Image: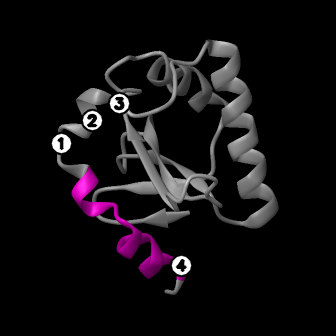
Amino acid sequence: MLKTERLLLRQWAEDDFLPFAEMCSDKDVMEFFPKLQTQSESYEMAKKIQALIEGRGWGLWALEIPNQHRFIGFVGLHIPKDNMPWRWKFQINIGLLGLSACISPKTICRFRHA
């Protein structure tokens, strides 16, 4: 688990799968992703992300705002297939809070080397 004043990066929980699926079916959230995903595809992807963190100790962490205990998106590191070594995705209403400014490859590297 990684924590800043404004964000908590943590392992995925089963409770994250439904809000993740809702995000993955939102055309605004998925604008720069290849396609919208079905609930089944989203659950499968979330389980894979969860397993990769379990196996490696790092990956695409679930995001939440401290003390709110709810999934708001994900951010992290992944072995790229498309020359994009870091990713983030927020629910559209959360992304507007300016939180993306406090998540960057530099921020993640600082946590990884702390």
Classified by dominant secondary structure, the portion drawn in magenta counts as helix
80 or 58: nearer the viewer: 80
The first of marks 1 and 4 along the sequence is: 1
Q: Answer whether residue 106 is magenta in the image.
A: yes
Q: Which residue is mark 3?
A: 91
* Amino acid beneath label 1: Leu
Badge 4 element:
helix
- Look at 25% across and 51% down and name the residue there: 99
Q: 10 Å neighbourhood of mark 1: few (<14), some, or many (≥20)?
A: few
**Span shown in magenta:** 100-112
Where does the N terminus fall, quadrant-wise? bottom right
| Total residue callouts | 4
What amino acid is labelled 4 in the image?
Arg
Q: Quadrant of residue 26?
A: top left
Is 93 above or below relative to 102?
above
Which residue is under mark 2?
94
Q: Is residue 99 left or right of residue 47?
A: left
Secondary structure of residue under mark 2: helix
Which class describes the residues within 10 Å of circle 3: few (<14), some (14-19), or many (20+)?
many
Q: Circle 1 is placed at which residue position?
A: 97
Circle 4 is placed at which residue position? 112
Q: Are marks 1 and 2 in contact (CB under 8 Å)?
A: yes
Q: Does 111 lie within the magenta span? A: yes
Q: CA distance from mark 1 to mark 4?
A: 25 Å
Residue 18 rendering spot, x and y as whole percentages: 57, 20
Seen from the viewer's position, the closer of residues 79 and 114 is 79
Q: Position of residue 6 (x, y in %)?
A: 28, 57
In the rendered view, does 59 fall on the left or right side of 74?
A: right
